[in-house]
Image (spheres, helix red, strand yellow):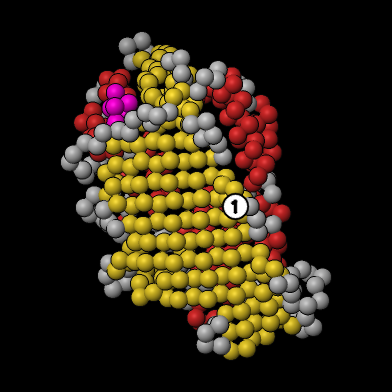
Amino acid sequence: MKKNILFAALLCGVLLSCKKKSFTEEPIPPTLPPTELGYSKLTTEQNKQALEQNGLDFIKKINTLPDEKFITLIERLGDLDLEALSNTIIGRELETIAFAGKNKQVEKLFSAVTTNNVAKTHNLSEYYGIYNWDLQKKEWTKTPSTSKFEVHYPSTATSNTNDALLTVSYTASKATISADGEAYELPAATNVSLSVSGKEELKLTGLYEYKINGTADATPTKADIRLNLGSFQLVVTAENDTKVLTSRVTLAKDSKELLNLVSTANLNGSYPNLEDLETPAEVIKDANMTFDVMNIRLTGQANIKIIQDDYDANDMLPEKESREKQVATMNKNSSLFAVYKDKNEIFAKNEFVMVSDTYTYTDYNPATGKWEPVTRTYYDLEPRLVFNDESKMSLKTFFGKGFTKFIDEFEIFTKKF
């Protein structure tokens, strides 16, 4: 079972997609483009070049993540088979962090520090002690402790001293969550440090607050998580008062921001337990977000209630008519803009259009007694970019040409996964 600290990361998907449930009563007007910002005067090709370079700059920065020392330190600890590493939430977090860093998977770094996989885990207090790796006997020795969790071990297979140190301090909250019929404690504060030869290579701190929902379950209401990975820094903050959910996720390198996601969601009156939640749309009235990657900023808003109601009301209409209504509703009740941060200029805005295509299959015709080809038309929604000259281009067309260098680099990047 997985328990998200706060589900703000899902808001990106909510902005442009929604499910069939409605909760709110009053429509919320969509966000308009910032009035102080004008359109960029760049041509379409120049916009492509700028966007491609932005992507290349991001990959160049993130490509050094696997070289950070914390990865080999965690992997070495795993090789020494310390039971607490795989049987506690914090140990599993470390394993996931190392995997994500090695493979440059930013989303898994986020998941590692915001998701508690509690099934079949033990409370850290059960493993309190000072552990030392015996270099001669090749086994762990433990000094009992009622308050400490420390691990001293060789940082590499050839190290002749226990030059690596893992320390964990942990304060349990009064909140618990249930999994497989058992209740597991949730942290109020955590502090994890991993160093070699006195130099800290990883530091993870977390502060958490909860709303108690019953005898064995709780809803997270506040989180402040900070993860330092060598030259990289990940910060996740979120706050939920059951009416408004705000969150921020920032990834930086040498204190220079690489990506930043800020989101706000207005919630409906009822707030189900997270394990009962099927989609974020079940609890969100409307949402807005700003997502920065290097110099490109996406900012958007969606009135989920009206969009959902439209889908429900028109679901039984003929497909073409239903899609036409959906397009009109999406354009009226959602907005998304791409901005150059350094110039404060709009690169493009998004609008939805209806597109059609045909497909042909073979079906049996009882009137003729033969198998005959049948052609059908289907309709769908397609997002399109609108530029300063009011020209429009589908995302498929825009990204279909002119990004050869970036695509080549990205293929190299993804093959490492």
Residue furthest toward the left? Answer: 25
Quarter containing the N terminus: bottom left
Magenta part mainly helix, strand or loop? Answer: helix
Tell me the kind of residue under disc 1: Ser
Residue 44, relative to residue 126: is it above or below? above
Mark 1 sits on what residue? 255
State the residue at coordinates (62%, 40%): 58
Magenta span covers which residues? 328-334
State the residue at coordinates (58%, 24%): 48
Quadrant position of residue 77: bottom right
Find residue 416 and report its horizontal and vertical position in percent: 68, 45
Q: Secondary structure at mark 1?
A: loop
The mark tally for this picture is: 1
Along the line of sight, the residue nearer the viewer: 270 or 87 = 270
State the residue at coordinates (36%, 41%): 288
Along the line of sight, the residue nearer the viewer: 208 or 31 = 31
